[in-house]
Amino acid sequence: MARLLHIDSSVQGDGSVSRQLTARAADVWRAAHPGGTVVYRDLGADPVPHLDAVAGISRLVPPDRHTEAQAASWALTEELVGEVAEADAILLGLPLYNYGVPSSVKAWVDHLIAPGLAYHPESMEGLLGGRDFVAIVSRGGGYGVGTPREGWDHATAWLPHGLSLTGLEPRFITAELTLAPQKPAMSSLVPLAEESRRQAEAAIDKLWPPAVTGI
């Protein structure tokens, strides 16, 4: 049975553009996979802990030598990697925060980089490749070619590198200028924001062709 791992990371609740777009994408996936299973994780509402000096070295210590804190950290890593390994497709909502990924997404990725689970510790071969990974990016401003902040979107640039050991290869759909309707100083950019949203929605609607039922 087909399985989608749907992850949100925005802290903006229902007003989040990335959440609205991932919800749309999840509906498209469901239409293409009747009877499929959607596993949902909300990193914005329930973030996973960052790796710290106590638990973070659990991936460097043999399990039979784990402290209680290390064992708990490793168990969470196994759970997170397991969610990815069991999924046929992964959908990640990725808002741009301070020109980078939300810290909750960084923590999630850090947990995935686990030897023996996500990559082979000797060959360094990724063990999670072959899955469809779609990251839906929302950016409050404009970061395209020729804009004053071209190249300031470090989230889109970083994610493929951060995941590279695992074999996962994300593709991106982006809606930008999402703050234009809220910021008077950006009011002249509202038409561009609306067009960017339309283009993102059109790309989402084409991600997975709907299932054909009956002849």
Image: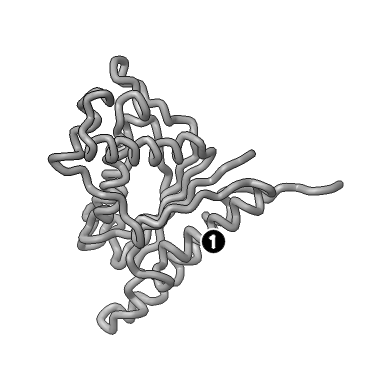
**Left or right: residue 18 compared with residue 121:** right
User: Is 196 drawn above or below residue 169 in the view shown?
Assistant: below
User: Mark 1 is on which residue type?
Assistant: Arg
* Local SS, label 1: helix
What is the basis of the colouring in this image?
Answer: one colour
Residue 82: percent from left, percent from top: 44, 36
User: Is 113 drawn above or below residue 34 in the view shown?
Assistant: above
Q: Residue at x 34, y 37 (%)?
A: 75
**Left or right: residue 176 compared with residue 206:** left
Residue 85 seen in the current view: yes
Residue 147: percent from left, percent from top: 25, 61
Q: Residue at x 53, y 46 (%)?
A: 4
186 or 5: nearer the viewer: 5
Picture quadrant where residue 84 is located: top left
204 or 114: nearer the viewer: 114
Picture quadrant where residue 186 is located: bottom left
Circle 1 Cα neighbour tier, 10 Å, few/some/many (<14 / 14–19 / ≥20): some
Identify the residue at the far left of this view.
53
Identify the residue at the far top of this view.
122
Residue 192 seen in the current view: no
Residue 110: percent from left, percent from top: 27, 40
Identify the residue at the far right of this view.
215
Q: Which residue is mark 1?
A: 24
Q: Residue at x 34, y 60 (%)?
A: 44
Query: How many tags in the picture?
Result: 1
Residue 156: percent from left, percent from top: 31, 49
Identify the residue at the far bottom of this view.
184
User: Is 57 drawn above or below residue 4 in the view shown?
Assistant: above
Q: Quadrant of the N terminus?
A: top right
Q: Residue at x 52, y 55 (%)?
A: 203
Picture quadrant where residue 189 is located: bottom left
